[in-house]
Amino acid sequence: MTMQFTARHSEQDHVRRVKSLASDRRMCRRLTALSMPFFLVAALVQRVVRPADRGPRLSIVAQARAQANATIPFMFMG
């Protein structure tokens, strides 16, 4: 005797999930755009307070974007 499990999802469920993911992406982009000034200031302060060694490093905008991308996803957890 074997048990078979099949998941049957309606097309409405699929459309709802796709819309939800698109909504989450839009919200993440908005939060990133709104928080960029804060992360830019934080990156500038970090460079002034703790200068890095010589060598290649990220631009201030790239550093701020990396900080935002590392922080904002935690808002969507839970």
Image (spheres, grey):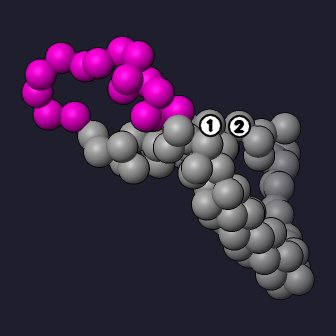
Q: Which residue is mark 2?
A: 74
Residue at point 78%, 77% (across, down): 19
Q: Residues within 10 Å of mark 2 (few under 14, many from 20)?
A: few
Which mark is in front, 1 or 2?
A: 1
Q: Which element carries disc 2, helix, strand or loop? A: helix
Q: Which residue is mark 1?
A: 71
Q: Extreme front residue here?
A: 48
43 within the magenta span: yes
Find residue 51 and report its horizontal and vertical position in percent: 29, 18
The quadrant of the rendering that contains the C terminus is top right
Residue 21 position (above or below residue 70): below
Q: Residues within 10 Å of mark 1 (few under 14, many from 20)?
A: few
Q: Nearer the viewer, residue 17 or 33?
A: 33
Q: Nearer the viewer, residue 68 or 38?
A: 38
Find residue 69 and report its horizontal and vertical position in percent: 54, 45
Residue 2 makes an appearance in the image: yes
63 within the magenta span: no
Looking at the image, residue 44 sits to the left or right of residue 37; the answer is left
Kind of residue at disc 2: Phe
Kindly indicate the quadrant of the structure image that contains residue 27: bottom right
Kind of residue at disc 1: Thr
Q: Which residues are magenta?
A: 42-57
Kindly indicate the quadrant of the structure image that contains residue 15: bottom right
Residue 56 position (above or below residue 14): above
Residue 14 makes an appearance in the image: no
Whether label 1 touches label 2, CB < 8 Å:
yes
Q: Nearer the viewer, residue 44 or 64?
A: 44
Residue 53 position (above or below residue 77): above
Residue at point 58%, 50% (across, down): 37
